[in-house]
Image: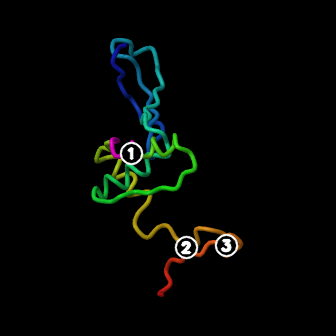
Amino acid sequence: MSDFVTETVLKRDVFSETHKGHLAGEPARPVIRRIVSAAPWWSRPLAWVLARHPNTVVIPGTTREAHLVENCGADAIRLDAATIRRLDAVFPPGKASGARYPPATQVENDTEEFGQSA
């Protein structure tokens, strides 16, 4: 396949970019290309946490063995510095706030009470 020449980045999100351009040697033939990480979407946030805090053990909840195996592969995902900066800008420390669960569910859950002193 010919090399892709980017002319414009049309859209950028946390784990993908959509580029407009052309193949090398064929500038009159426009091409749209989406560049996406090959990692499953649910393991990407784990990779981001591990990239920021390499000595952290990430323990996500899952009910499927296949997802557990994929989550364990998050440590093999290498995010480049630009991706980490984009994620840090989207999710700065302290940005997330509020209850994790709605009140009716929180009543049934006594394991997660944040922001309250014991």
Left or right: 111 in relation to 28: right
User: Residue 75's spot in the image, x, y percent?
Assistant: 34, 46
Task: State the image quarter where residue 3 is shown.
Answer: top left
Specify few, some or many for label 1: CA neighbours under 10 Å numbering under 14, 14-19, or 20 or more.
Answer: many
Crowdedness near tag 2: few (<14), some (14–19) or many (≥20) residues, C-alpha within 10 Å: few
Query: Which badge, 1 or 2, is on the more N-terminal residue?
Result: 1
Measure the C-alpha gap from mark 2 to mark 3.
9 Å
Verify whether residue 44 appears in magenta.
Answer: no
Between 63 and 115, the residue placed more toward the observer is 63
Q: Residue furthest front?
A: 65
- Which element type, helix, strand or loop, lies under badge 2? loop
Residue type at numbered disc 3: Glu
Q: Which residues are magenta?
A: 73-77
Q: Which mark is residue 111?
A: 2
Q: Is disc 1 placed on a helix, strand or loop?
A: helix
Asked if the stretch drawn in magenta spans residue 75, the answer is: yes
Q: Residue at x 46, y 19 (%)?
A: 30
Tell me if 64 is positioned left or right of 69 in this view. Answer: right
Distance CA(mark 1)–CA(mark 2): 26 Å
Q: Which residue does the image show at 50% across and 84% down from the upper left? A: 116
Q: Nearer the viewer, residue 40 or 21?
A: 40
Q: What amino acid type should be assigned to the residue bearing mark 1?
A: Ala
Relative horizontal placement of residue 67, taking residue 108 as reference (left or right): left
Q: Which residue is mark 1?
A: 74
Q: Which residue is mark 3?
A: 108
- Residues under labels 1 and 3: Cα distance? 31 Å
Which quarter shows the N terminus?
top left
Crowdedness near tag 3: few (<14), some (14–19) or many (≥20) residues, C-alpha within 10 Å: few
What mark, if any, has residue 34 been given in the picture? none
